Image (cartoon, rainbow, N blue to C red):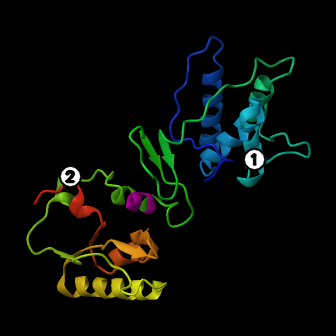
Amino acid sequence: DNPYTINIGLYYIASDTDGRSYDLFDTLLDYLRRHPHAFDQGLVNCVLKKVISHPRINYIKDRDNCKVDGFDTDERGHLVDGALQSLILKTRPGKMMGTGNYNFTLVDGVVAASYALPFLFRDTLAVHVLSSVPLSSSFGKKVVAKELMLWEDGDDYFHVRRGRFLALDGVLASSSGADDFVYLKNRLTELCALARQTNRILILPATWHLSRRLQAWELVELASLERLGVGWREATYLANPRLKV
């Protein structure tokens, strides 16, 4: 759901004869060392969008990451940093002094699922949670991974000990089927309070609202729940094949 920014989590780099791939990443890493608070993904997008020329992905230039992510440019749009601008001048297609533009491809959305609520397929190899707060934080991404049963935790996390857990028998939903989001939040708040009072770990219930499955973070702020001393497990916890009963 963010077609104008290239994610930078993983790169496979083909070998070349003139060292352009090495120069690209060496220059970017050097800049990040000199500016440790710079946004790494923004920097990669800022530079790549100045050197690509493939017509199929020119649309990503509609977002100017140099401007959006705070990389200084002059009145002509050239980067102020000499090392970055030199890299761009050497690689920009059509320039006499250039050695040609960089070629890269985007991974198929089925292979690398990227969305707030990723839908996984047989061929999915990677998942990237792409959304605003709270899912932009590492905690939020971990919550989604847990709900997808993709979170790798210690064996103790999946070890069920007698008397430790509190779980709702069935699903949490409005009995009338009406659009009553407040009802759902109130019932979940009661479960959280009961878990705290009985010193149990709450297994968050599967929740439905108008025929749509809700995620736990849509109803309760899980980080604050932990601060209150209420442990929790994701709604899919009891279905996880790693569970040890």
Q: Which mark is residue 241?
A: 2
Residue 134 at what x, y percent from top left? Answer: 50, 67
Locate residue 157, reporting x and y percent: 21, 59
Q: Which residue ends up furthest to the top in the rendered image?
A: 17
| Residue in the image at 29% along x and 62% along y | 236
Residues 35 and 181: in front is 181
Q: Quadrant of residue 172?
A: bottom left
Along the line of sight, the residue nearer the viewer: 35 or 177:
177
Kind of residue at badge 2: Pro
The reply, left or right, for residue 117 in relation to residue 236 is: right
Residue 50's image quarter?
A: top right
Residue 137 higher or lower than 48, as above or below? below
User: Disc 1 residue type?
Assistant: Cys
Q: Residue at image x 65%, y 31%?
A: 27
Nearer-the-camera pick, 232 or 85: 232
Q: Relative to residue 11, is residue 205 depicted above or below?
A: below
Q: Look at mark 1 in the image and give the residue it sits on.
A: 66
11 drawn magenta = no
Residue 83 visible here: no
Q: Earlier in the sequence, mark 1 or mark 2?
A: 1
Pointer 2 local density, CA inside 10 Å: few below 14, some 14–19, many at least 20: few
Q: Position of residue 20 (x, y in %)?
A: 66, 20
Secondary element at tag 2: loop
User: SS at mark 1?
Assistant: helix
Which residue is at the far front? 176
**What distance separates the C-alpha of mark 1 from that of mark 2?**
45 Å
Tell me: 42 left or right of 123. Answer: right
What are the residue bounds of the magenta stretch?
140-144
Are dots 1 and 2 in contact, CB under 8 Å?
Answer: no
Q: Is residue 229 visible?
A: yes
Q: Where 71 sits versus 229, above or below?
A: above
Considering every residue shown, the one lying at the far right of the view is: 75
